[in-house]
Amino acid sequence: MQASVIQSVDRSNNIASSRVPAVLMVWLGVNAMDAALTLLLIGLGGIEGNPMLSYLQGEMGAVWMLSIKLAISAAVGLALVLRGRAPMLTLASKLMGLVVVYNAVVAFYYFAPTATMPFVS
């Protein structure tokens, strides 16, 4: 049933059927990378930048907070695919990729404390 829904969405929006699952997988992948880097940085004393997730972290712990974040991300991604909004999900994946790159830079400079961050004085 679910495959037929995705195929009907594909036909109505002229999206190749092999691209829609790939867009969803990229979305889930960048969110998983963000979760992993966030967990690493929290373990090193960092804080979650999202106020709602930061509250959940304080109430439930980092692992549960990231589990909820990933569940919400998966639900949003699936909803966008099923509603034929794969281009919007592509843009969201690119923006989330920038967040992952930022987190990776912060983690790198944390592990290399003698290095100076070029954008921080």
Image (spheres, rainbow, N blue to C red):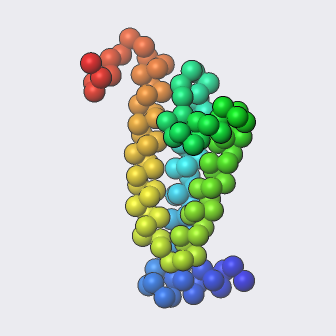
Residue at horizontal 45 percent and vertical 50 percent from the top: 96
Q: Position of residue 53 (x, y in %)?
A: 59, 41
Quadrant of residue 90 within the rendered picture: bottom left
Q: Position of residue 118 (x, y in %)?
A: 27, 24
Q: Position of residue 39 (x, y in %)?
A: 61, 33
Quadrant of residue 14 within the rendered picture: bottom left
The answer to whether 4 is drawn above or below residue 97 in the figure is: below
Residue 22 seen from this side: no
Left or right, 42 with reference to 16: right
The answer to whether 108 is drawn above or below residue 86 in the figure is: above
Residue at horizontal 46 percent and vertical 20 percent from the top: 110
Left or right, 75 with reference to 12: right
Q: Position of residue 22 (x, y in %)?
A: 53, 66
The N terminus sits in image quarter: bottom right
Residue at horizontal 59 percent and vertical 47 percent from the top: 32
Quadrant of residue 57 within the rendered picture: top right
The C terminus sits in image quarter: top left
The answer to whether 8 is drawn above or below residue 66 in the figure is: below
Residue at horizontal 44 percent and vertical 48 percent from the top: 97
